[in-house]
Image (cartoon, rainbow, N blue to C red):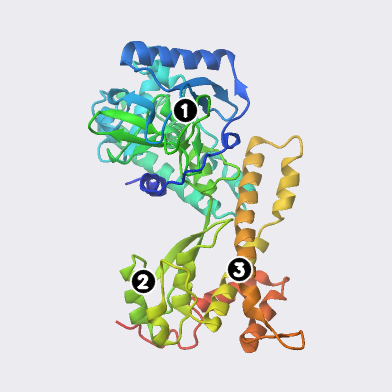
């Protein structure tokens, strides 16, 4: 069974192909109070080991300490131009599926399983060796586990992630993780189980090891594999696209952290991650405030009873979409392709089909635009009012003393989600404003879409029933409530 962490791979693969922006990411996004003493010794030991045992060359960055979130602070020790390497790591210091397959103890258990599962089994096996492991200096710098919600008790998941879309994904991943361990445990039992100590190989240890792998393994697009990498594993991550790129240089056989914009000496660096906060929390146990890559998703679809369904289906498939499609929404920008899909889905005039564009923000006509914006308005209102409180209330909660770290993480996640919904809601209202009415000579407003507006205004004036009314309205928009829905056969 392939463990259900394909979202993790998807985000990291998409990250490798992302278009870069050339603005500087803020140091405050990933810098924090630093820890010292024994943890600083671990840093020094790792760097010494990499230099003496692995031939680490001189770098353009220095590690100056450990942040409160467990990441390390890296700063440039010289000026670096765009496209130059900030960090270069010899290829043989990476732990990949090749090392798992060659491992004397867990190669058989990992065979036929996903890369991430294999790396987790490798980590369990190497940890039991302690100081005898050839990777001991690296392993000492990895945490025993992360605070991913996947490892939280079910009651705590339900309480702290209530109404967040992250909760459903969290439960699915927990179930997949447990099923994966059951399969591994059966294999251990059916083989010579004495080789695998239950004290080392048990479900809790597997879940904890997997949490570390998910948080610290890097996806190398050019090599098309996951890898555990000293230094890179501890580097801060950022959702800002000006963050450094991590990849494998096939010609030089080195892992490179490459600058995507110029750096001056003494500037902090972070690796571009590109995951929204929900995925980031599940994978790493952390949330990034003001994450530039943060988003939620909205699922939309074509109406199969639509007389134009066949041609619309051809149009969306020609641009790589399906008849049911998921789109991201952001706090600070309107998604052009989501708008284009909705415009096409609700279009009734075939003469306007040629005007549909998934590349530019093209309004088809006022009536269609009004309907599309009201659909988005209703969806965002519905989801926003489903939360127990507002983003401002979460902010006040975060200012209270005595919050547990998990309560704090969940509040930060909820606040970020609400800000995305509110940002989209505000953007939709700004677009609706000029459509709802036009000035008249008398100074009043005449609504060019008065009939439609009356329907939608009813929805907006029912705050006591937003879930029932708007939810039903969105169901209708997807074609689920069409009167003749079950009587007609879908077009071929």
- The span from disc 2 to disc 3 (Cα, nearest Å) is 23 Å
The residue wearing badge 2 is: 316
Sequence-first tag of 2 and 3: 2
Q: Position of residue 223 (x, y in %)?
A: 27, 38
Q: Nearer the viewer, mark 2 or mark 3?
A: 3
Q: Quadrant of residue 463?
A: bottom right
Residue 309 at x, y percent in the picture: 37, 81
Would residue 426 appear left or right of 180 to someone viewing this image?
right
Q: Position of residue 55 (x, y in %)?
A: 31, 15
Q: Residues within 10 Å of mark 2 (few under 14, many from 20)?
A: many
Q: Earlier in the sequence, mark 2 or mark 1?
A: 1
Q: CA distance from mark 1 to mark 3?
A: 40 Å
Q: Which residue is found at the position 44% from the left and 77% from the top?
A: 344
Asked if residue 397 lies left or right of residue 166, the reply is right
> In percent of the image, x 75 and y 85: which residue is there?
444
Can the viewer see residue 120? no
In the image, taking residue 82 as reference, residue 264 lies left or right, namely right
Q: CA distance from mark 2 to mark 1?
A: 42 Å
Rendered residue at 42%/42% (across/down): 177
Tag 1 residue: 234
Q: Which residue is mark 3?
A: 428
């Amino acid at each position: 069974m392939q463990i259900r962490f394909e979202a993790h791979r998807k985000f990291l693969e998409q990250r490798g192909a992302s278009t870069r922006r050339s603005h500087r990411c803020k140091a405050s996004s990933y810098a924090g109070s630093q820890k010292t003493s024994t943890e600083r010794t671990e840093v020094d030991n790792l760097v010494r080991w990499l230099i003496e045992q692995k031939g680490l060359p001189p770098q353009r960055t220095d590690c100056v300490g450990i942040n409160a979130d467990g990441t390390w602070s890296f700063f440039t020790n010289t000026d670096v131009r765009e496209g130059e390497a900030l960090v270069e790591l010899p290829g043989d210091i990476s732990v990949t599926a090749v090392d798992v397959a060659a491992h004397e103890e867990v190669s058989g258990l990992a065979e036929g399983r996903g890369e991430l599962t294999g790396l987790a089994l490798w980590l369990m096996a190497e940890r039991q060796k302690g100081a005898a492991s050839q990777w001991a200096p690296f392993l000492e710098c990895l945490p025993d586990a992360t605070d991913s919600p996947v490892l939280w008790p079910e009651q705590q998941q339900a309480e702290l992630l209530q109404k967040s879309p992250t909760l459903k994904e969290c439960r699915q991943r927990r179930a997949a993780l447990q099923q994966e361990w059951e399969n591994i445990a059966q294999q251990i039992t059916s083989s010579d189980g004495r080789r695998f100590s239950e004290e080392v190989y048990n479900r809790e240890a597997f879940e904890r090891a997997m949490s570390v792998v998910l948080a610290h393994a890097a996806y190398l697009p050019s090599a098309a594999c996951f890898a555990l990498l000293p230094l890179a594993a501890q580097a801060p991550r950022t959702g800002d696209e000006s963050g450094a790129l991590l990849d494998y240089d096939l010609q030089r056989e080195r892992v490179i952290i490459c600058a995507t914009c110029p750096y001056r000496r003494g500037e902090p660096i972070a690796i571009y991650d590109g995951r929204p906060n929900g995925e980031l929390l599940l994978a790493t146990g952390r949330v990034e405030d003001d994450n530039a890559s943060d988003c939620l998703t909205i699922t939309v679809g074509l109406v199969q009873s639509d007389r134009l369904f066949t041609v619309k289906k051809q149009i969306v498939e020609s641009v790589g979409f399906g008849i049911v499609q998921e789109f991201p929404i952001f706090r600070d920008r309107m998604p052009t392709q989501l708008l284009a899909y909705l415009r096409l889905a609700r279009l009734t005039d075939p003469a306007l089909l040629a005007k549909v564009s998934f590349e530019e923000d093209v309004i088809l006509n006022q009536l269609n635009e009004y309907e599309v914006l009201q659909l988005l308005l209703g969806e965002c209102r519905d989801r926003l009012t489903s939360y127990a409180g507002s983003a401002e209330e979460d902010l006040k909660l975060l200012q209270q003393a005595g919050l547990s770290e998990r309560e704090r993480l969940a509040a930060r996640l909820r606040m970020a989600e609400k800000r995305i919904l509110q940002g989209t809601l505000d953007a939709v209202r700004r677009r609706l404003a000029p459509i709802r009415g036009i000035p008249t000579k008398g100074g009043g407003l005449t609504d060019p879409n008065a009939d439609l507006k009356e329907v939608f205004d009813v929805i907006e004036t029912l705050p006591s029933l937003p879930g029932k009314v708007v939810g039903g309205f969105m169901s209708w928009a997807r074609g689920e409530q069409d009167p003749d829905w079950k009587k007609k056969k879908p077009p071929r």
